[in-house]
Amino acid sequence: MEPLRDLSSITDWDHFTPSVEGYIPPSNLDVDVWELLECLDDLQGGGTIANLFVSSDTTNPGVVFKNKMVSLPLTELDAKAFAKNGVMVDNRVYELDVQKFSCSNPRWESVARAGVDSALAKTRPVSHTASLTSITAVIASGAQSLDLHPVQKSHYATVLVILPSQRTSTTLHISHGNQGLALKLTETAPFSMHFIALYTGTESALLVSPGDSILYLKYQVFKKDKFVPSPCLADATGARPEIATVFAAWRSSLSAGVKVNDSIPDHIIYQLDGTYANGVDAIGITHPKDKLVLGHFAPPAKHFGFEILLAHVTFTESSSWEHYRDYKEYDEEYDVDDYEVGDHGEISLDVECLLTALDGNGVNDDQLADTISKVIEDEDLIFNDHLRESDEGEKDLQITDQSCYTDTLKLECVKLATYLVIVPV
């Protein structure tokens, strides 16, 4: 099921009707729920279907073909000279593969590597290599529909490097599913390299240069580790069938009254990256990754008869210990930043949980609130759990008792967190 881009529709959960267009129910419902939901780690909250990086590095790659070096910024004369030697691949579009030209500047390889990595910054990071495959000229007024099919399984991205020129009107139009993007390639064009990262499998990418000729290098990017999933468009956009399968399997198990395996949950708890005030509605979920996760959860959850709640948690860790000091020096001062909970004494936990619906209204379900508190206390399975790892928290140090030689100190650290909680209706 397609994820939601606009979360306003789910503030009225009772009347929210997800689209199931194109959805095909899974044939196998005996699945490992926790394993399928690992796909949540791959979702890129700040992701986009393409990314532009404009490099201020003025290193000239030193493109040479037929013993002639291309001067930069590109002139119309050089562009047309290149076209005469290139292979016509589209109307007013000419190409040379990597065997027919070279980048003669020895510094270019490191500059290109840095630019490619910067352009890929909004994709899920994986170890990769980038291979130069061709150079292409688009002669004004020309346009090229880019071929973004993968050449092999590990090929997950293509990076174009638009070389400096006097262009004033070049644009790359990208579309995939219900998302579209137009990248203007004119910023400081005579003095900058424009690196554009595109996912393989992108439905449409049209490079248009109505007033000026351009020249670009093409790099194909391959992941190194065959056991690591490739970054893909579904990380930033599009449906994740694994999530719909989770809800289908969960509902099937509930309907049968029997858990088909131990991974079928009683609830799903996911810690959001942002922390939100009690009473926030779905529109108030602003962290990019949080919006993406909720947008993926909502359609299958509603379709299969589940409810999504927000749990606002106050997590308090405390410890007490005796500190020895000089006789009757009752005014000794202590700096709270010198201590961490657990450095001295046993840690005590207190977890308070308030539940709200996606419209911001409170939900009175003490049993569920207690269950969530217990799960957090016991460190049971919570997706994206990072509460204890967080350095954020308000610390308070108090003297709770004194004797002639000791102060009894109590250190508290209070952390706030917000969770998505999914339960059957």
Image (cartoon, grey):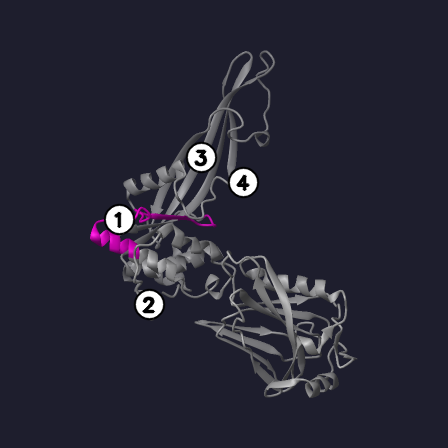
Earlier residue among tags 1 and 3: 1
**Residue at image coords 67%, 83%:** 213
Decide: marks 4, 3 in contact (CB < 8 A)?
A: no
Q: Which residue is mark 4?
A: 391
Earlier residue among tags 1 and 4: 1
Compute the Cα span from label 4 to label 2: 42 Å
- Residue 53 drawn above or below residue 381: below
**Of circles 2 and 1, which is in front?**
1
SS class, disc 2: loop
**Of circles 4 and 2, which is in front?**
2
Earlier residue among tags 2 and 1: 2
Decide: marks 4, 2 in contact (CB < 8 A)?
A: no
Residue 250: where, in percent of width, then height? 29, 53
Asked if the magenta segment contains residue 237, the reply would be no
> Callout 4, which amino acid?
Asp
Disc number for residue 23: 2
Q: Count neighbours of disc 4 (C-alpha within 10 A) and say few if under 14, some if 14 to 19, many if 20 or more.
A: few
Disc number for residue 316: 3
Compute the Cα span from label 1 to label 4: 38 Å
Residue 405: where, in percent of width, then height? 56, 12
Decide: marks 1, 3 in contact (CB < 8 A)?
A: no
Q: Count neighbours of disc 2 (C-alpha within 10 A) and say few if under 14, some if 14 to 19, many if 20 or more.
A: few
Residue 65: where, in percent of width, then height? 74, 79
SS class, disc 3: strand
Asked if the magenta segment contains residue 273, the reply would be yes
Where is residue 348, by image quadrant?
Answer: top left
SS class, disc 4: loop
- Residue 343 drawn above or below residue 271: above
Visible in this render: residue 280? Answer: no
